[in-house]
Image: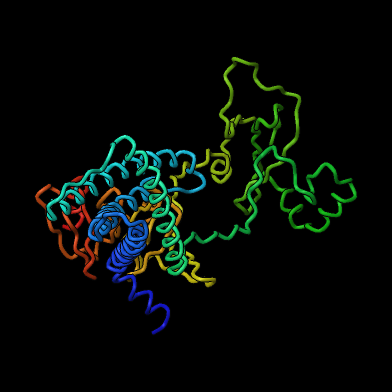
């Protein structure tokens, strides 16, 4: 089997593997502690039976097995990453104390049941002292579980590969230069050029100079530039439709403060009551208001996996799950983490193909095979590959409308 085959085999049974690993580690630790503590008891010649030691260790391990899923959920809700460490660390400390209290109450109850089954009674001791003692140990156990779970996730992400956005190539087309902006170097209108350089430029374009000799009905226009007024003459060339604009500064000042001003785009003031050419009017008309154009939707993502890179087509993403600062992109039993929020990623998807079904889930519409309502008013979605995703009642009606 190849590496990808092993990964696919593991991911299909990931939940079973994870539960097996936690149960093995915690129960194995309880068995080892039972053996060592029983040997210490025998060495100290204390009147303690082996089942008592076993009840102490295994009751604690069973409670931690029940608490591990809640600790993992806490890691998802309040991820311990560098940018949020100062804000989330106190929350985890409080949650670890709450876990300690549940752990102590649960293991004491289990020990009392075991002792009662053996015909004895279990005495936990002074609660204030014992709770403080257990809290010190449980906070360390909580930190150990968080560390192991975080390291496991990091290793799994490295194995699967982490997705990232493809960098867009910069456009090679130069940006247009607006009116009033200094001329670029080499422009014949550049005031830094001397007369000889400007003459040389015009000698290279005799046709352009000859085309501007025959004009009809010039119309003057005022264009406010950098606090002064300039007069431009628009002339239409005979036999052509392109206007020629000549700009010359004048001493006319801008309107005083409080006086009505000309429109900011361009204002026209005809010098003589004649009809200008249609093309000249079109050139001087206000620019059309363009509707906002949405950026193109990304077609691929870049995935880095164990030192290799490959492209992940957006069309192959089946569903998306929010996970703290990341989202998991699910594709063919693989989860590719992407550093983004679910709402931001939703904006890049086609709404006719993906639908929000939960505050933490997006799913591709065509992959939904069945909707299974629950008594609470929510539903479970069964996909074509057998996966089951939650659907909250908030999104259920809209999902049904899109499916029909």
As rendered, which of 50 and 69 lies closer to the eye? Answer: 50
Q: Residue at x 49, y 39 (%)?
A: 86
As rendered, which of 14 and 138 lies closer to the eye? Answer: 138
- The part of the image, by quadrant, that contains residue 239 is bottom right
Which quadrant of the rendered structure holds the C terminus?
Answer: bottom left
Residue 318 in view, yes or no: no
132 left or right of 48 in image: right
Q: Residue at x 18, y 65 (%)?
A: 369
Quick one: which residue is furthest to the left in this view?
Answer: 375
Residue 152 in picture, x, y percent from top left: 42, 62
Residue 232 in view, yes or no: yes
Count of residue discs: 0
Residue 177 in picture, x, y percent from top left: 66, 45
As rendered, which of 140 and 94 lies closer to the eye? Answer: 140
- The part of the image, by quadrant, that contains residue 317 is bottom left
Residue 36 in picture, x, y percent from top left: 36, 62
Quick one: which residue is furthest to the top in this view?
Answer: 258
Residue 305 in picture, x, y percent from top left: 49, 69
Which quadrant of the rendered structure holds the N terminus?
Answer: bottom left
As rendered, which of 225 and 19 lies closer to the eye? Answer: 19
């Amino acid at each position: 089997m190849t590496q990808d085959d092993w990964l696919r085999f593991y991911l299909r049974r990931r939940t079973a593997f994870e539960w097996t690993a936690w149960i093995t580690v915690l129960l194995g630790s309880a068995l080892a502690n039972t053996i060592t503590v029983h040997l210490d008891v025998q060495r100290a010649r204390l009147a303690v039976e082996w089942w008592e030691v076993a009840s102490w260790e295994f009751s604690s391990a069973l409670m931690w097995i029940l608490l591990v899923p809640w600790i993992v959920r806490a890691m998802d809700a309040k991820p311990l990453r560098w940018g949020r460490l100062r804000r989330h660390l106190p929350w985890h400390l409080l949650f670890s104390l709450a876990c300690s209290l549940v752990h102590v109450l649960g293991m004491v109850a289990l020990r009392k049941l075991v002792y009662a089954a053996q015909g004895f009674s279990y005495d936990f001791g002074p609660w204030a002292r014992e709770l403080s003692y257990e809290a010190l140990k449980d906070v360390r156990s909580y930190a150990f579980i968080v560390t192991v779970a975080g390291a496991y996730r990091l290793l799994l992400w490295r194995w699967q590969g982490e997705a990232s956005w493809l960098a867009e190539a910069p456009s090679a087309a130069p940006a247009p230069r607006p009116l009033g902006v200094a001329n670029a170097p080499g422009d014949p209108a550049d005031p830094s050029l001397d007369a000889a350089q400007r003459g040389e430029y015009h000698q290279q374009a005799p046709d352009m100079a000859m085309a501007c000799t025959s004009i009809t009905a010039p119309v003057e226009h005022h264009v406010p530039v950098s606090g002064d007024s300039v007069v431009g003459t628009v002339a239409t060339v005979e036999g052509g439709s392109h206007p020629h604009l000549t700009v010359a500064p004048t001493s006319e000042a801008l309107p005083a403060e409080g006086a009505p001003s000309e429109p900011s785009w361009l204002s026209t003031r005809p010098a003589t009551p004649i009809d200008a050419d249609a093309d000249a009017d079109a050139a001087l008309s206000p620019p059309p208001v363009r509707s906002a154009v949405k950026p193109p939707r990304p077609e691929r993502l870049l995935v880095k996996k164990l030192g290799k890179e490959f492209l992940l087509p957006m069309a192959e993403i089946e569903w998306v799950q929010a996970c703290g600062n990341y989202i998991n992109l699910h594709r063919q039993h693989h989860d590719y983490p992407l550093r983004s929020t679910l709402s931001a990623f939703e904006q890049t998807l086609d709404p006719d193909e993906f639908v929000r079904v939960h505050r933490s889930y997006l799913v591709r519409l065509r992959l939904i095979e069945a909707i299974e309502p629950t008594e609470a008013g929510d539903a479970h979605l069964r996909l074509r590959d057998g996966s089951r995703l939650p659907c909250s009642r908030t999104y259920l009606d809209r999902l049904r409308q899109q499916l029909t």
